[in-house]
Amino acid sequence: MEIDKQTMKRISETSRIKLSEKEEETLTKDLNNILSFFSEIKKLELDKGEEYYIGRKKSKQRKDEPENRKEESEEIVKAFNSEEDRYLLAPKSL
Amino acid sequence: MKETHEKLQKGILKPSENLELKIKKIEENEGKIHAFINIYLEEARKRAEELDKKEKKGKLYGLVIAVKDNIAVKGMKMTCASKMLENYLPPYNASVIEKIIEEDGIIIGKTNMDEFACGSDTTHSAFQTTRNPTDLNKVPGGSSGGSAAAVKAGFCDLALGSDTGGSIRCPASFCKTFGFKPSYGSISRYGLADMAMSLDQIGVFSEDVYGIQLLFNIIKGDDARDAVTTTQKQSTTKNKVAIVKEFFENCDKKIEESVREKIKKLNAEEISIPSLKYALPTYYLLVYSEFASTMQKYDGLKYGSKGKPGDLTETVSSARSENFGLEVKRRILLGTYITSKDYREAWYVTTLKARSAIKSEIEEKLKEYDYLLGPTMPMEAWNIGEKGEPTQMYAADILTVPINIAGLSAISIPLKNGGLQVIASQGDDDKLLKFAEGLEK
């Protein structure tokens, strides 16, 4: 079994997804089945490099000029779940 | 929809009249099909009335267009079929939407999909299941099932979808309509909630190639806001087409017959692409990795459904666990695992190398042949609820994923049984659509 209970706890913490006991059990089984289903890829003899680009090999750049998007920025602030003086309020880290 | 387009352009049919025809169909059948998550009839009627009075007609004048709910339309909710974004209103229009509005298209509503595009049958939406208009007990395919169903059911003239591993071509095949996934980089993804950024493309559904060409030509093009967009260069014509042996492995016999019958006159040479055997794992492992990364932005703080009160970790974790569906969670957890430090080399880096191998093998073949042919899906639409187990569903994507791995252009053409998939080099979109026109008859 590639992913054990400990590993699952670690992954769910890193992903910031809180799992119930039952979900942890089901998902551990699912993930192990899926990885085993795809494990044949490890048999592939690969001498190629890693492919990162699909098309453009060079990044495109734009001019660093400010745009006036006041209306949009109002909408963005309106969507904050907690706001004060146009700042997003987030709970304390610890 | 060529006829409708021409009537509108000539003034024989008014935009409001065209819209009412679509609304009538929606009133009759949307209750059975559930193609839309949100419909905006009032807004559409208002827009149509404005257009009725307009002298100078845009290229999409009066055409009714449905949009997959992962593409931003200002003033319309953008849920991505997830509880996480149930009430989210995007503050801007996607680039493709700006272009549609500029050319006088009427956007009628946002269509159902698998949650955050995680699925191949549109049964993974947090809100509703869309039914296949050709058989209400069957799935419409996914993840752009709502858009395909809306076009097939006559609720709209054209629809937008997105395709990461077959999410346009699969529903096109299952709903028996045309679905086109352009080359990677042909259409701006600005305003598309991405699933896997090296694989996603926005594409088009229509009941004919004419409609695909019409909408594609308007929404394509370079965009400063999407760094991968580029004006694609067309390849030289080779006057040769090939049929790929591997595409028929485990394919439904009737579909194979339909495909071979359709392409009989093309004198296709039979070729083999052995690395295709690794396309499915390569695709899914890439998706998990990129998906886990892109889903980090949903924290219930900046927008979207809130988490429980607590410290930062608790709030964010509860927002995510309460508002993401099971398949979404699976993919995020898998992606986190295979890109983590200890496992990255064994899984993620291996996948990137496999991608290189597959991509170069297919590209080699496309230097010799104009098009690669085969079935779009190895089976017909399954019954709703039939493929509950993830790997069963993943396996259905086997014929569509290689195209996204290599960033190619592909269209699905409906047949008596299944669909014909025609694949062309990255950059050959116009050439492919011209060829598809010929196959339409």
Image (tube, coloured by chain):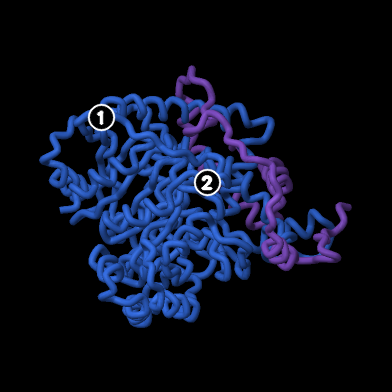
Image position of B433 (left or right of B70)? left
Residue at horizontal 46 percent and vertical 75 percent from the top: B47
Judge whether residue B9 can be spotted in this image.
yes
Which residue lies at the image location 39% right of the left edge and 45% below the top edge?
B182
B282 or A52, nearer to the observer: A52
Residue B420 vertical position relative to residue B285 in the rendered view, above or below:
below
Chain B: its colour in the image is blue
Q: Nearer the viewer, residue B44 or B30?
A: B44
Residue B314 in the image, given as x and y percentages of width and height: 79, 57
Question: Which residue lies under the disc numbered 2?
Answer: B223
Nearest the viewer among B219 and B246 is: B219
Q: Give x and y (percent) for residue B20.
A: 35, 81
Q: Is residue B284 visible?
A: no
Horizontal side of B66 relative to B261 (left or right) equals: right
Residue carrying label 1: B369
Q: Colour of chain A?
A: purple
Going from the N terminus, do you reach mark 2 or mark 1 first? Answer: 2
Q: Residue at x 28, y 46 (%)?
A: B433
The quarter of the picture where residue B65 lies is bottom left
Q: Quadrant of the N terminus of chain B?
A: bottom left
- Where residue B275 sits in the image (x, y, percent)? 37, 28
